[in-house]
C-alpha cells in the first residue's frame, strides 16, 4: 500500500512539473519495490496477533469463546493479511486445543491436519513453522493417549524429542509453551496411561521441576503444569508433595483474573486424591465432598472427558467408604446426561455425530458400574460386562504394542549408545594416530633438516679441504716459476720488477680467495654502479707483458647491481689471465644487455686457447691443477665471486669459457643489470 502511494505521488509530480527526473524517480521506486518481499502492515498484524492472543488466553477458561476468537482471527488474516502464515498456524493450533478441551477429537484432528499441511509448504514469510509443528504433534499425542493408542503417542513424543526443536533458545514464548506442553504430555502418559512404569518417574519429575522457572507462559499454563506434577507425585506415592502443587494452584485461583473452572475442578479432585492417601489428614466424608465438588465443577465446564473422570473418581471413592447410595446417584446422573447428550447431538447434526471415546475412563466407569450392582436387569449387567471386557481387551492390546515399541526403542538406544561409543573409540584412536603421524612428520622434517645441515657442513668441509689443496697446488704451481726467475742472477731489473708484480698479484688472489671461502670472511656489499668505471679501474691495474697485444675496453653505458670491488678483482684476473696467454693479437672487453635483466660481460683473446678437458677443469676448486697447466688461482677465485653474486640475487649469475686450441678463448660473465634487474 505504501509503495503504491509513492508511485502515485511521483506520477502526480511528473504531470504537474513536467520533469523527466521525477518520472525516473517513480520508475526507480517501482523497480526497487518489485525486488522486495512485501511487508505486512504492523497495525494489521498487531490486530491479528491480538485476536490470537485473546483466543489463547481463553483456551482453558472458555473453549467456545476461544473458538470464536480464533475463527475471527482466521477471517481477518484471510481478508487483510493473506501471507501471514504464522498467524494462521497459531489460530489453527489454538482451535485444535479448544476442540480437545471439548472432547471433539475429530474437529481437533482436522485443525492439526491444516497446521501440518501449511507448515509443509515452508513459506518464506513463515518463521514459527517448526515450533507450531511441535505444538500440533504434542496435541496429537494427547488425542492418541485418550484413545489409549499409547505406542503411537509415545512415538510422536519420541520424534519431537529427537527433533531438537525444543532445545532452541530463540523461540520465545511459543518455545516455553511447547516445552511445558511436552512435559505435561509426558507426565500424563507415564502416570495415567502407563501407571508410572516407564523409566525412573522421579527423574522425569526432577527434570520438570528444574525447568519450571523457564516455562513461564500465563497463569493457565502454570496451573496445568502444577497439576501434571501433582498427578505424577501422587502416582509415585509422594502425596504431601502433590498437595504442595495443589496449594500453588489454589493461590493462583484465588485471583479473580486467573480463576478457571477447569483448573479449579482438576485441583480439587487432585487434592482429594492426595488427602485420601494421607491417613488422619481428612475425614472420608470431607474427601468425598471434595470429589463431588470437583465432579460438579466438571459438569459446569462441560467437557465430557473430565465429566466422566469426575464421575468415576467420586463413585469409586463412595463405594470405597461404603456410601453406595452416593455412588448410585452420581453414576445415574452420568448415564442420564449421556443419554440426553447423545439424543440432542444426533438430532442437531446426525452427519457429524460420533460417540465420545475415552477407553481408559470408560473402563473405569464400567468397573464401578459392575461393582455398584446398580443394573436394573440381568441384560443390562451383561451389556456392561461385555463392554468392560471389550475395553479391557482393547487397552491390553495397545499396552502390548506400547511394550513392544519400548523394547524396540530401548534396543535402538543401546545400539545407538554402542555405536556412539564405538565411534568415540575410533575417533580417539584416529586422533592418537593423527597425533603420532603429525609427531612423526615433524620428527622426520627435523631429521631431514639436520641431515641437510650435516650434508651442507660436510660439503663445506670438503670444500675447505679442496680449498687448502687448491691453495697449496697454486702456491706450488704459480709461485715456483716466479721463485726460479728471482734466483736467476742474470735477471734484468725490468723483468725482476714484472716477476715481483705477478707474484704479488698471485698472493693477493690467494688472500681474496681465502677471505671469500671461509665463514666470516670478506663482506659482500652490493650496489648499483656504472660498468664503465670498473672497466677503467681494471685498465689501470693490469700490465701488458707483450707490447704486440692490443687491449681494448669497449665503451658501455650499462650499470650493474653487484659488489664493485669483487667485480674489479674478477675482471682484473680474467683480463690478466688473457694477457698471460696472448702473445700477439688482441684482447677485447665488452658488455651487452641480454634482455632479461642481465648483463653479459665478455673478454675475447686471440691467445693459445684450450681443449675441452682444460675448459671443464678451469673453474673447479675441488681439483688440483694438472701438472703443466698454465691457468692458476685467479679463475677459481672468479668462480667464487660469481657464486657470491648468485647466492644474493638468485637471478642465475654465471661464468663460463668458450675456447678452441690455437684460436683463442672467450670468457663470459653474466651479472644483474643495475637498471632493469632485481
Image (tube, rainbow, N blue to C red):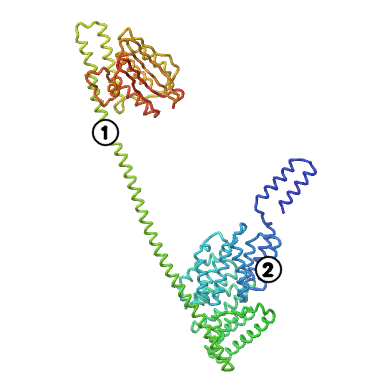
Q: Quadrant of residue 329?
A: bottom right
Which quarter shows the C terminus?
Answer: top left
Element carrying mark 1: helix
Any part of residue 316 in sight: no
Identify the residue under disc 2.
71
Name the residue nearer the viewer: 505 or 225. 505
Residue 584, position as x, y percentages in the image = 32, 9
Name the residue nearer the viewer: 303 or 549. 549
Distance, label 1 to label 2, CA atoms, is 94 Å
Q: From the viewer's perspective, is 229 left or right of 428?
A: right
Element carrying mark 2: helix
Residue 245, position as x, y percentages in the image = 53, 74
Residue 651, position as x, y percentages in the image = 40, 28
Any part of residue 345 in sight: yes
Name the residue nearer the viewer: 586 or 30. 586
Give me the disc on residue 176.
Answer: none
Residue 430, position as x, y percentages in the image = 37, 54
Identify the residue under disc 1.
458
Q: Earlier in the sequence, mark 1 or mark 2?
A: 2
Q: Quadrant of residue 582?
A: top left
Name the residue nearer the viewer: 467 or 514. 467
Which quarter shows the N terminus?
Answer: bottom right
* Vertical side of 178 occupied by 498: above or below: above
Amino acid at each position: 500500500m505504501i509503495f503504491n502511494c509513492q508511485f502515485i505521488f511521483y506520477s502526480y509530480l511528473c504531470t504537474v512539473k513536467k520533469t523527466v527526473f521525477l518520472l525516473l524517480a517513480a520508475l526507480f521506486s517501482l523497480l526497487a519495490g518489485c525486488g522486495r518481499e512485501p511487508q505486512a502492515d504492523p497495525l494489521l498484524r498487531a490486530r491479528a496477533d491480538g485476536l490470537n492472543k485473546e483466543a489463547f488466553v481463553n483456551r482453558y477458561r472458555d473453549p467456545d469463546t476461544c473458538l470464536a476468537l480464533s475463527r475471527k482471527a482466521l477471517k481477518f488474516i484471510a481478508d487483510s493479511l493473506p501471507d501471514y502464515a504464522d498467524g494462521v498456524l497459531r489460530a489453527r493450533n489454538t482451535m485444535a486445543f479448544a476442540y480437545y478441551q471439548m472432547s471433539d477429537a475429530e474437529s481437533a484432528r482436522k485443525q492439526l491436519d491444516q497446521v501440518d499441511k501449511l507448515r509443509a509448504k515452508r513459506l518464506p514469510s513463515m518463521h514459527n513453522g517448526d515450533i507450531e509443528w511441535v505444538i500440533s504433534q504434542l496435541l496429537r499425542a494427547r488425542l492418541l493417549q485418550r484413545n489409549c493408542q499409547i505406542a503411537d503417542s509415545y512415538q510422536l513424543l519420541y520424534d519431537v524429542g529427537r527433533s531438537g526443536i525444543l532445545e532452541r533458545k530463540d523461540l520465545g514464548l511459543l518455545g516455553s509453551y511447547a516445552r511445558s506442553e511436552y512435559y505435561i504430555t509426558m507426565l500424563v502418559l507415564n502416570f495415567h496411561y502407563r501407571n508410572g512404569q516407564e523409566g525412573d518417574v522421579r527423574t522425569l519429575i526432577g527434570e520438570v521441576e528444574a525447568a519450571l522457572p523457564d516455562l513461564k507462559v500465563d497463569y493457565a499454563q502454570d496451573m496445568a503444569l502444577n497439576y501434571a506434577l501433582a498427578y505424577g507425585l501422587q502416582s509415585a506415592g509422594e502425596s504431601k508433595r502433590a498437595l504442595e502443587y495443589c496449594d500453588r494452584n489454589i493461590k493462583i485461583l484465588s485471583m479473580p483474573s486467573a480463576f478457571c473452572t477447569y483448573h479449579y475442578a482438576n485441583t480439587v479432585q487432585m487434592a482429594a486424591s492426595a488427602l485420601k492417601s494421607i491417613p488422619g489428614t481428612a475425614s472420608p466424608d470431607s474427601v468425598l465432598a471434595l470429589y463431588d465438588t470437583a465432579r460438579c465443577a466438571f459438569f459446569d465446564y462441560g467437557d465430557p472427558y473430565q465429566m466422566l473422570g469426575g464421575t468415576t473418581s467420586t463413585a469409586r471413592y463412595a463405594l470405597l467408604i461404603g456410601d453406595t447410595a452416593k455412588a448410585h446417584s452420581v453414576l445415574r446422573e452420568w448415564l442420564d446426561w449421556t443419554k440426553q447428550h447423545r439424543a440432542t447431538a444426533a438430532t442437531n447434526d446426525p452427519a457429524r455425530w460420533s460417540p465420545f471415546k475415552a477407553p481408559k475412563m470408560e473402563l473405569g466407569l464400567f468397573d464401578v458400574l459392575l461393582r455398584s450392582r446398580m443394573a436394573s436387569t440381568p441384560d443390562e449387567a451383561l451389556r456392561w460386562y461385555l463392554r468392560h471386557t471389550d475395553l479391557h481387551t482393547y487397552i491390553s492390546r495397545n499396552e502390548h504394542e506400547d511394550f513392544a515399541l519400548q523394547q524396540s526403542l530401548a534396543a535402538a538406544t543401546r545400539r545407538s549408545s554402542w555405536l556412539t561409543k564405538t565411534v568415540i573409540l575410533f575417533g580417539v584412536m584416529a586422533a592418537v594416530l593423527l597425533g603420532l603421524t603429525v609427531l612423526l612428520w615433524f620428527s622426520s622434517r627435523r631429521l631431514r633438516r639436520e641431515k641437510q645441515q650435516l650434508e651442507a657442513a660436510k660439503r663445506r668441509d670438503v670444500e675447505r679441504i679442496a680449498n687448502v689443496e687448491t691453495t697449496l697446488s697454486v702456491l706450488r704451481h704459480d709461485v715456483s716459476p716466479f721463485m726460479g726467475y728471482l734466483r736467476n742472477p742474470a735477471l734484468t731489473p725490468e723483468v725482476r720488477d714484472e716477476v715481483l708484480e705477478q707474484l704479488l698479484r698471485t698472493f693477493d688472489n690467494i688472500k681474496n680467495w681465502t677471505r671469500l671461502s671461509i665463514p666470516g670472511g670478506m663482506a659482500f656489499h652490493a650496489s648499483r654502479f656504472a660498468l664503465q668505471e670498473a672497466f677503467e679501474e681494471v685498465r689501470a691495474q693490469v700490465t701488458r707483458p707483450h707490447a704486440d697485444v692490443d687491449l681494448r675496453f669497449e665503451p658501455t653505458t650499462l650499470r650493474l647491481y653487484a659488489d664493485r670491488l669483487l667485480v674489479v678483482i674478477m675482471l682484473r684476473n680474467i683480463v690478466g689471465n688473457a694477457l698471460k696467454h696472448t702473445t700477439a693479437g688482441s684482447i677485447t672487453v665488452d658488455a651487452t644487455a641480454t634482455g632479461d635483466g642481465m648483463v653479459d660481460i665478455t673478454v675475447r683473446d686471440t691467445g693459445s686457447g684450450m681443449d675441452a678437458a682444460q675448459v671443464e677443469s678451469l673453474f673447479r676448486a675441488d681439483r688440483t691443477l694438472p701438472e703443466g697447466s698454465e691457468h692458476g688461482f685467479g679463475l677459481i677465485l672468479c668462480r667464487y665471486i660469481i657464486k657470491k653474486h648468485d647466492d644474493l640475487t638468485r637471478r642465475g649469475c654465471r661464468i663460463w669459457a668458450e675456447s678452441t686450441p690455437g684460436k683463442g678463448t672467450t670468457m663470459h660473465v653474466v651479472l644483474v643489470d643495475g637498471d632493469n634487474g632485481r
